[in-house]
Amino acid sequence: MDPETSQALATRISRILQSVIGTGDESLPRLAAIELDSIYADYATRARPVTFLRFVRCVWDSFVHLAGRLNRNGDGHRKLARIIRWLEKLPNRPFPDDYDKSDEILSRYDLGGTGRWDAFTRVEPSIPLNIEGLLSTDAEFQRCLNVHAFTVLLTKSRLIPLPRQAMLAIGQATKGVIVQKEDGSPEFVSSDPHDIEQLDMKVAVAAIWIQRASHVFWHSNPHDTISEGGPFWKKIYANLSKKDPNHLSLYRERLSVWVQQFGEISENSNVAEEIRDIAREVQDTLDEIY
């Protein structure tokens, strides 16, 4: 898709999504879903058609962009979620066979035999994870938190599966770092929260997932994320997986590590009091499901 077409499509989609915000008209999410379906039909039948998965990415990007600008404690996210709910209710037209099945990114999605908008909800939205590289202002950080809160809402509502990014976001705050001593001695794996850069932001992102959707982590664990994480967890995983490769045991151990690490953060005097308080609340939430 050329840049001009991409921009025009993004603008049309954004206008539709924006139309449901700031109004009490409960019929608008359904109408927005119908209009999105019509836009796809338009772009898919042009002389230079837009493939469905390119269209899906553009729709998700528009949802995420708008969600980042909406207060996570308001009702805007709920209205956007209702559009997705209505997309699921549209006639289940066959999924277009216009994508590269060898695509490495798409290979992890089970798209075979799905309907058009069923496939949409199986492709994960792109949510920010690179805290160090992405966030330079508080406004950017608030947008990041808003996006994660929106994705949590979709996950809790069973509109999308538990995203890989959720596990990775929590891992950034709990799974350790490799530290190089100033005297030049060999690197070592540290589980000390004080060694984690921008710990305050990472704890805040993790807290959104755990406090708003803690039960989902126990009932929905993507098998291919259990080995992922920082060096502290990878070291534990390497030892445990040899002794007991059972996924349920590993999930429980990872949950134990989360409890332990948030406990360490909550008691670390080098960490800001506000972050210690958040970590303590997260630990209490995890204790309830552990």
Image (cartoon, rainbow, N blue to C red):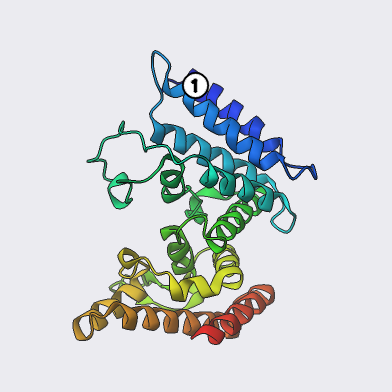
Mark 1, other Cα within 10 Å: few <14 / some 14–19 / many ≥20: few
Q: Is residue 3 above or below residue 198?
A: above
Q: Is residue 100 above or below residue 225?
A: above
Q: Is residue 9 visible?
A: yes
Which amino acid type is shown beneath numbered disc 1? Answer: Asp
Res 205 quadrant in image: bottom right
Res 213 quadrant in image: bottom right
Location of residue 240 in the rendering, given as x and y in whole percent from the top left corner: 26, 83
Q: Can you say which quadrant of the picture contains the N terminus?
A: top left
161 sits left or right of 33 in the view: left
Location of residue 3 in the rendering, given as x and y in whole percent from the top left corner: 47, 21
State the residue at coordinates (54%, 67%): 206
Number of marks in picture: 1
State the residue at coordinates (33%, 50%): 109
Q: Is residue 182 visible?
A: no
Q: Residue furthest front?
A: 91
Q: Closer to the camera, 258 or 101?
A: 101
Q: Closer to the camera, 20 or 233?
A: 20
Q: Is residue 63 above or below residue 48?
A: below
- Badge 1 marks a residue whose secondary structure is helix
242 sits left or right of 95 in the view: left
In the rendered image, which residue does mark 1 sit on? 42
Location of residue 232 in the rendering, given as x and y in whole percent from the top left corner: 36, 75
Q: Closer to the camera, 138 or 84?
A: 84
Location of residue 61 in the rendering, given as x and y in whole percent from the top left corner: 52, 39
76 sits left or right of 83 in the view: right
State the residue at coordinates (50%, 18%): 4
Q: Closer to the camera, 121 or 93?
A: 93
